[in-house]
Image (cartoon, rainbow, N blue to C red):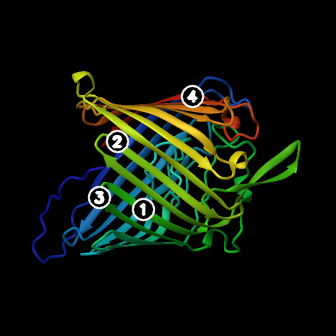
Amino acid sequence: MAFTQPLVAQAAGEATWLPQEMRGRLAVEHRQFFATGTHGQDTVQPSVVIEPEWYWEWEQGTQSVNLVPFARWDAMDNERSHIDLREAIYAYYGDRLELRAGIGKVFWGVTESQHLVDVINQTDAVESVDGEAKLGQPMVHFAYLADLGVWELFVLPYFRERTFAGSDGRLTVAGVNTDEARYESSRGKKHVDLAARYSVSWDVWDIGLSYFHGTSRDPYFLVEGSDWLRSLVPFYAQMDQLSVDLQGLWGDWLWKLEALRRFSLDNHSAVTAGFEYTYVGVADTAWDVGVLAEYLYDSREKQAPVVGQNDIFAGVRWALNDIAGTEVLFGVSQDLDDARSQTARLEASSRLGSAWRWNINAWYFDADDERDPVYGLRRDNYVEVGLSYYF
């Protein structure tokens, strides 16, 4: 979000605190499912979101604080009604050194279908099915701007557990018991995780090399109880992960890759790679149409507890380049080992005037193999409409 210029100018050499600036959004959203859930859950799911943002800066912009709380009330699912502090971060900007400390959000990745290398923040799984919504992460973040590239170090002193929808909610893991979550580390949530990253732009390429040591953001599940009263207990193992992400632009072609090697309870490798080709000014209009294709691989093959172990993603991105900023994305993921395992999604949004924005998100899931992660979502096809006011 953009902030207005300060109302009071800072005199040279003075350490005047600039006035507080506030922005944010208030949204009303509605999910409509096309069938009752596998456990009889309702088909109607309205909710309300508020996400304000406060920003301060001083010392001629070399120091700042950003505060972003988030709250959702959901009529169907008590677990989806939640409050989180997305950001509460202090930042210092020197000539070459940058420091951030507090609760923050960091994103790594370039591909469209999934973000393999994005490991700093925990997924807020009650917010979206694509895993892009994240919880705020306590951190100390150092960055050094070298002549060639940026070196970064992250110290993460506290772990955030993944959120899951409740038994009355949709898009959930059936029988998950978050109250009994367990850890491989004896320090549990207080294990200090570490991460390092080097990123550089070289010719047409943007390259990132990353390393993470600590508690995996992706839980394993322990099966406990009897067949008639079974529960799944999240187990957060330790892991070491080496990863690379790169993106290259040649004319209208955008090539993308994310790859990792993870050492944990099940050592494995994973790759997502593909391209986006953009047709500029289609049919003598202002429209741009992008064609996307990506391949998703996981060395655990059918034993992988994730979508995308041997899949193809294909999609179309349509940007109208109008005043309202209208964009539409449609994509389909197909499992190459199982013709019945597929997902599809639609994302569309546009502005209404200067303060309002509408959006439509839709998801389709199909699978007939109980071992497939998509199988648990086979009755959760839905369309979500939202209207946001930005203040």
- Tell me the crowding category of disc 2: few under 14, some 14 to 19, or many 20 or more residues within 10 angstroms, Cα based: some
First of labels 1, 4 by sequence position: 1
Residue that appears at 62% across and 46% down: 79
Instruction: Name the secondary structure under disc 2.
Output: strand
Q: CA distance from mark 4 to mark 2?
A: 33 Å
The residue that label 3 is drawn on is 203
| SS at badge 3 | loop
Where residue 27 appears, as percent x and y from the top left, is 42, 38
Distance (Cα) linking label 3 and label 4 = 43 Å
Locate residue 290, reporting x and y percent.
36, 34
**Image quarter of residue 159:** bottom right
Foreground: disc 1 or disc 4? 1
Q: Which residue is mark 4?
A: 382
Q: Name the kind of residue labelled 4 in the image.
A: Tyr
Q: Between label 2 and label 1, give the one nearer the viewer.
A: 2
Type of amino acid at the residue the image marks with label 1: Gly
Crowdedness near tag 4: few (<14), some (14–19) or many (≥20) residues, C-alpha within 10 Å: many
Q: Is residue 386 visible?
A: no
Q: Which comes before the other along the chain, label 2 or label 3?
A: 3
Along the line of sight, which residue is nearer the eye, 243 or 223?
Answer: 243
Query: Residue 49's spot in the image, x, y percent?
Result: 46, 42
Please, is residue 169 above or below residue 83 in the view?
A: above
Q: State which tag comes first along the sequence, 2 or 1.
A: 1
The correct choice, above or below, for 252 with respect to 283 in the image is below
In the picture of the structure, the residue carrying the numbered disc 1 is: 208
Residue at the spot 27% in from the left edge and 28% down from the top edge: 287
Location of residue 366 (image quadrant): top right
> Disc 4 or 2, which lies upstream in sequence?
2
Read off the residue under disc 2. 253
